[in-house]
Amino acid sequence: MTSTKSVRVQDFKRIVFFTGAGVSAESGVPTFRGKGGMWEQYDYQSYACQDAFEKDPEKVWTFNNMRRSMVGACQPNEAHRIIARCEQDLDAEVTVVTQNIDGFHQIAGSQNVLELHGSLWRVRCDVCHNQHTSHEPSLEDLHCDRCGSWWRPDIVWFGDNLLQAVIEKSMRAIYACDLLVSIGTSAVVFPAAQMPLEARNVGATLIEINPEETRLSSFYDHCMRGPASKMLAELCVF
Ligand code: OAD
Ligand code: ZN
């Protein structure tokens, strides 16, 4: 493994930033796993799967509204801003493929963002296929304004399939990239975990940014051990 000092983002033409909860950790949004992680405090089977929602939609909505309020009180950090700046300032096609549902990449200015796990701010009606997006910290009206059924958070829960169209767009970007930077993901949730590694098949340079080693670290050309904002500032020198 060589030093990332030899890697200049300016030398690449198609860059994918593949992000997970760690990129928002410095914004104050807790990650899912590890110390202080969401799934340590909340049992995901009671809050983040279709069965739980069907059994007790109010309980799932209380959890979801708590997350909306909590994330809504936080802001994107320097890591999101550096990624947005790459899209704006580099002479390269930059795509963000994210597992995050907080919308921080878009708020920071990234335009080409693919949300693999949906959005905390969007709800859908599975009865009449209505959709609604709002940034209210706590969604007050929990029922579809067209048919009165429960709004369902448009988040990919455990056991759900990812949206095919989003996977296809993400894979197209990954198969076309010459640099992939994976940031702040524990790489344990499939199919997302496996996706960045596909970039190896097209000869891209792969960089992992994470303060900790992950189960997929050995597949990367370079691993930068540290917080996202500091590591991105080192990598992306304009
Ligand atoms: P995890 O919570 O599983 O992992 C967060 C990763 O971020 C860990 O590997 C940390 O070491 C790393 N990390 C922590 N602080 C960091 C920092 N300042 N800079 C960089 N990295 C840092 O989050 P994800 O991998 O995103 O799915 O989790 C994947 C999916 O599992 C989520 O999208 C969510 C969850 O259940 C759904 O909700 C469907
Ligand atoms: Zn409806």
Image: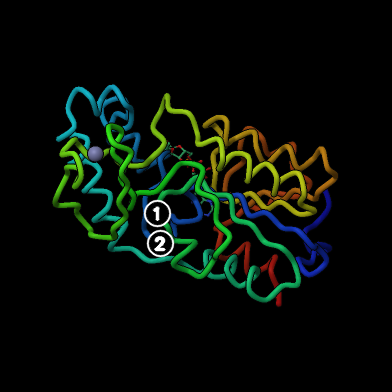
Q: Which mark is residue 74?
A: none
Q: Which mark is residue 27?
A: 2
Crowding at label 1, few (<14), some or many (≥20) Cα neighbours within 10 Å? many
Residue contact at pointers 2 and 1, CB within 8 angstroms:
yes
Residue 121 against residue 216 in the figure, above or below: below
Q: Secondary structure at mark 1?
A: loop
Q: Quadrant of residue 4?
A: bottom right
Residue 78 against residue 195 in the figure, above or below: below
* 72 sits to left or right of 84: left
Q: Position of residue 188 (x, y in %)?
A: 54, 31
Q: Is mark 1 within 8 Å of ligand 1?
A: no
Q: Position of residue 194 (x, y in %)?
A: 64, 33
At horizontal 38% and vertical 40% (from top left) the residue drawn is 155
Kind of residue at badge 2: Ser
Sequence-first tag of 2 and 1: 2
At horizontal 82% and vertical 37% (from top left) the residue drawn is 201
Q: Position of residue 204 (x, y in %)?
A: 81, 48
Q: What separation in Å lies between label 2 and label 1 (alpha carbons)? A: 11 Å
Colour mapping used in the image: rainbow
Q: Secondary structure at mark 2?
A: loop
At horizontal 52% and vertical 32% (from top left) the residue drawn is 189
Q: Quadrant of residue 171?
A: top right
* 95 sits to left or right of 159: right
Q: Nearer the viewer, residue 90 or 3?
A: 90
Q: Which mark is residue 102?
A: 1
